[in-house]
Image (spheres, helix red, strand yellow):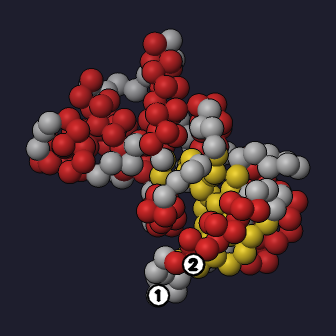
Amino acid sequence: MNQIQMRNPARPIRVFVVDDDQTVRSATQERLNLLAGIRCVGVAEDGEAALRLIPGINPDVVLMDIRLLDISGIECMRRLRSELPMLRFVMFTGYPEPELVVGSFRAGASGMLTKPHSIEELEKAVRDTCADMLYLSLPAANAMVSVLQRKWVNGDGAVPLSAREDHVMQCLIAGKWNKEIADTLGIGEGSVHTYLQRIYAKLGVHSRGEAVQKYLGIKPG
C-alpha cells in the first residue's frame, strides 16, 4: 500500500533531503544525524531523483528545496503527495517570496525553513512537522503576514476576528507558544488560552494547526 503508516514513536524520525546544492545537502544530512531521535535516510539532487527514490524509502518528513534545477519543489511535492498522501514536507528557500510561501502551503507543505538556518531551527521544523503542526521560520512567517495584510486591505476573505484575536493568530503563524504569545502581547497566559478558545469557536476548529490552516485558507492535506 503506497501510504505511510502511523510512525512508531520509539524509532527515529526519518528525513529525506532534496536540494540541488551539494554543500547544503551534505551539511543538512550531517546536522540531522547529530540530532537525537532524527536520522537522514536519503538525499536527492533534483526532483526526478526525489520522485524515483522517495516512494521506496517512505521517510516521515521530506526537506524540499523550492527552486530545483529540473522541476519546482512545489510540483515535486504535489506529485509525491498524490502517491504518498501522509508524507510531510518542509520547504527550503533562500528567499521567502510571499507567493511561494503561500503556494507551498496550499500545495500541501507543513513547514517552511529559510536558508541559512540554525540546527535548532532545523530540529524544530522536523519535530513540529512530524507532530502535525505547521512550522514557519520567522522570515517565512513575515512573508505570510504580508500576504494576509494585503488580503485584509483588499477586503478579500477576511476572517471575523477581533483585532486582539488577529494578533494572536499572527503569533500562531509565527510558531509561538502560549507563553511567547503572552510575552509578545503583554497579557497573561490565561488570556491567551481564552483568546484561543474564542478563535477556535469562530473558525470552527479544534487545534492550533487547524486554526492556522483555516485562517490562511489552506485546505488540510
Rendered position, 56 above or below 155: below
Separation of marks 1 and 2 at Cα, in angstroms: 17 Å
Q: Position of residue 213 (x, y in %)?
A: 48, 43
Q: Nearer the viewer, mark 1 or mark 2?
A: 2
Residue type, mark 1 in image:
Ala
- Where does the N terminus fall, quadrant-wise? bottom right
Q: Give the structural element (helix, strand or loop) at label 1.
A: loop
In the displayed structure, does residue 5 sit left or right of residue 50? left
* Above/below status of 182 relative to 56: above
The picture places residue 199, in percent across and down from the top left corner, at 29, 38
Q: Which of the pair 174/204 is nearer the observer?
A: 174
Q: Quadrant of residue 44?
A: bottom right
Q: Quadrant of residue 172?
A: top left
Across and down, in percent, residue 185 comes to: 20, 35
What's the residue at 68%, 60% (across, down)?
A: 24
Q: Earlier in the sequence, mark 1 or mark 2?
A: 1
> What residue lies at 74% left-to-right and 70% top-to-bottom?
43
Q: Pointers 1 and 2 in contact (CB under 8 A)?
A: no
Tag shown at residue 33: 2
Pointer 1 local density, CA inside 10 Å: few below 14, some 14–19, many at least 20? few
* Residue 164 in sight in this render: yes
In the image, residue 216 lies at what x, y percent?
49, 35
- At label 2, counting other C-alpha atoms closer than 10 Å, the crowd grade (few under 14, some 14-19, many 20 or more) is some
The disc placed on residue 10 is: 1
The residue lying at 40 percent from left, 26 percent from top is 159
Q: Say what secondary structure mark 2 lies in.
A: helix
Identify which residue is drawn at 49% across, 76% down.
35
